[in-house]
Amino acid sequence: MDGFNDVTGFDTLAIHAGQEPDPATGAVVPPIYQVSTYKQDGIGGLRGGYEYSRTANPTRAALEECLAALEGGLRGLAFASGMAAEDTLLRTICKPGDHVVIPDDAYGGTYRLVSKVLSRWGLEYDPVPLADIAAVRAAVRPETRAIWVETPTNPLLGIADIAALAQVAAEAGALLVVDNTFASPYLQRPLALGADVVVHSTTKYIGGHSDVVGGALIVSDIALGAELAFHQNSMGAVAGPFDAWLTLRGVKTLGVRMDRHCANAARVAEFLVGHPRVASVRYPGLPDHPGHDVAVKQMRAFGGMVSFQLADGEEAAVRVCEGTDLFILGESLGGVESLIEHPARMTHASAAGSPLEVPADLVRLSVGIEDADDLLADLERALG
Ligand SMILES: *Cc1c(COP(=O)(O)O)cnc(C)c1O
């Protein structure tokens, strides 16, 4: 697997990067600096560079440093949500009249931001199947500023070849942006594969406990990092100190949680493949998944998300979603508890009639870290 050559191990970084004991008290975790402003020792005499908490806050700075280390980048920036990170990024790197290539099964919120908000500001876009490198190359124009990648995708779990797309972006003079929310930096590190920017909804695996909404950007180019920090401060969609602290608490266990998510999801996928009511299973760990070889090349393991289609169609899919006990019917993903949802009526309802419409007989699982046997029994009961 490419991209994991660091001297310090991932779990050590998750627990220690940016999190030295507090210099004032020795507190072993960074305190929640619930503060807006800081005493200056004479005009401009800032202690540790802190002036005003929109610009920088020590709890947020700890999270930003930790996330940068986990992605192998040099600068991390934490935002109030994944969408706030995306909006800040696109309005930093693009100007009206520019163009972006987006996945034809992009996260619904990303598609809405680009097609309903930033299009009014003058941003142009084309949804393209990213597994088709020739199609991506054909969609690139002189004004293309970014190729936006998700892999695995939501909810269809398609796989895109990050290294191959990085080459297309470089040839086009565009930035390669990778939304790494589904994999997390434990499973996949896009910067090492040639990406310019990593985007996260830290709400999902990084936070991991369904108790905080947040987002992040990570880059390895210092100049781009400074430009993003300028826009983060100018636009103001920053993570608050308590949210940053909760996210930092979550990220410490990212590696051990992901190992269990992946093991449980593999068991669930295998169970679904053998079930007579299931027509097809989408999981990159299955050898017949069209992106399996690329996933093997660029991921440590295959993640905790599994989607499947029911042999008996949409009504059967809805019945399964409403029939589980342990799998909680709900949107979002990446928490310790298992979730089930019907994308066509829930997370992707707004995509109906667009190029991002999803099959009506599709069910999406976010497989949690409960005992796998209990999860299989729950699905067995609901499938009937
Ligand atoms: C949830 C999600 C987002 C948006 O993040 P929020 O924290 O909900 O604003 C972006 N991309 C992906 C892949 C997501 O799953």
Image: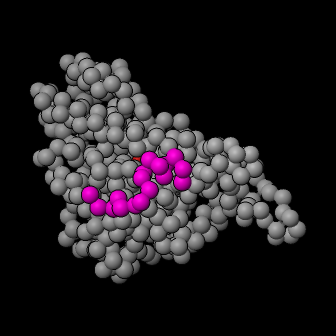
Along the line of sight, the residue nearer the viewer: 82 or 48: 48
Which residue corresponds to the image point at 40% horizontal and 38% vertical from the top-left?
Answer: 257
Residue 163 lies in what quarter of the image?
bottom left
Along the line of sight, the residue nearer the viewer: 383 or 126: 383
Along the line of sight, the residue nearer the viewer: 376 or 113: 376
> Is residue 14 magenta-colored?
yes
For residue 281, side relative to residue 2 (left or right):
left
Vertical relation: 264 (above or below) 177: above
Which residue corresponds to the image point at 44% horizontal and 62% vertical from the top-left?
Answer: 72
Residue 231 lies in what quarter of the image?
bottom right
Image spot of residue 254 (x, y percent):
44, 43
User: If the image is split into quadrants, where does the C terminus sit?
Assistant: top left
Image spot of residue 238 (x, y percent):
62, 55
Image spot of residue 92 (x, y percent):
53, 70
Vertical relation: 20 (above or below) 228: above
Which residue corresponds to the image point at 17% horizontal and 34% vertical from the top-left?
Answer: 270
In the current view of this chain or complex, which residue is farthest to the front?
A: 7
Q: What segment is highlighted magenta in the picture?
A: 1-17
> Is residue 134 magenta-colored?
no
Residue 375 lies in what quarter of the image?
top left
Which residue corresponds to the image point at 82% horizontal and 70% vertical from the top-left?
Answer: 44
- Is residue 352 something that shows in the picture? no
User: If the image is split into quadrants, where does the N terminus sit?
Assistant: bottom left
Vertical relation: 379 (above or below) 210: above
For residue 116, side relative to residue 365 (left or right):
right
